[in-house]
Amino acid sequence: MEHFDDVVLVTDVRFAEVAMSLRGILESYRLIVHFVRLVQRRQCEAFFSGVDRPSAELTILASHGLTTDDGEPCLWFECVDNPSPDPKATSGWVPDRFDLTPTTIPKYVRDMQGSVVSVACGGGREPLARAFLAAGADAYVGATEPYIDMGSAVLFVTGLVYYLLAGDRDFAPRGYTFDEAVQRASEFDADWAGGTGSFRVWR
């Protein structure tokens, strides 16, 4: 990775505060951040299908994570939906949730590019990772534990990008592979169950 590379950062209304913090950090590293705040379900579908998704070698999914009643790991984006085809309709909106699970990812996610990083609780569990890899991602990163402290998630992303950019800094000409950067960033607070230690990369 080099300074002024493109990064996609996607979030929803519930996770926007953390996502905006991440945006500030990424831009302080002189990266070009495409900040995508999903509001309507149709936006979620368009983004993940690739119809309306910026191109970048790094995509960060900033959302909550949980386990569904069926026992599946899930990334969920809170949104609204409307039976009207008009995205500017002034009435008829109802709360909705856009769930990405190993079952729904093959339906909704297409043509993922580069590396995908989830900061969600449990966002790095293997079934989710395998589904994103099958959808085209070169690498998928997330926390394998069902709970991750949000401060730890921010710390992990900060460290990941720091190491990815090492080869582009005059004072640190050594570069790190993506997998090496993930490993180093995961070691910041590896001793705490809710810390960075459960982040791992899948290929």
Image (cartoon, grey):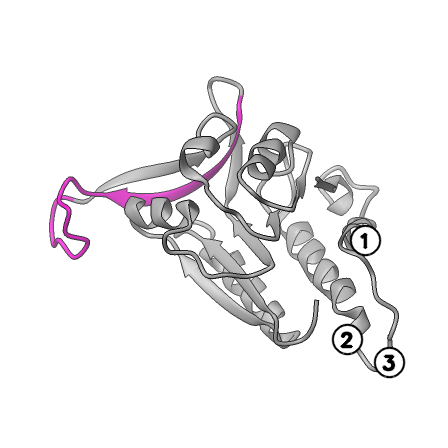
Is 183 in front, or is 139?
A: 139
Q: Which residue is mark 2?
A: 168
Residue 155 position in % (x across, y down): 70, 57
Which residue corresponds to mark 1? 188
Q: Quadrant of the C terminus?
A: top right
**Residue under label 3:** 171
Residues shaded magenta: 72-92
Q: In 3D space, how far apart are the residues under numbered discs 2 and 3 (Cα atoms)?
A: 9 Å
Give the SS element for disc 3.
Answer: loop
Q: In the picture, residue 25 is in which quadrant?
A: bottom right
Examine the structure image and report whether residue 192 is included in the region drawn in magenta: no
In magenta stretch: residue 73: yes
- Compute the Cα span from label 2 to label 1: 22 Å
Secondary structure under badge 1?
Answer: loop
In the rendered image, residue 202, in percent from the top left (x then y), is placed at 70, 39
Q: Amino acid at mark 1?
A: Phe
Verify CB contact (< 8 Å) between mark 2 and mark 1. no
Amino acid type at circle 3 is Phe
Q: Earlier in the sequence, mark 2 or mark 1?
A: 2
Mark 2: few/some/many CA within 10 Å (<14, 14-19, 20+): some
Mark 3 vs mark 1, foreground winner is 3
Secondary structure under tag 2 reads helix
Q: Nearer the viewer, residue 109 or 77?
A: 109
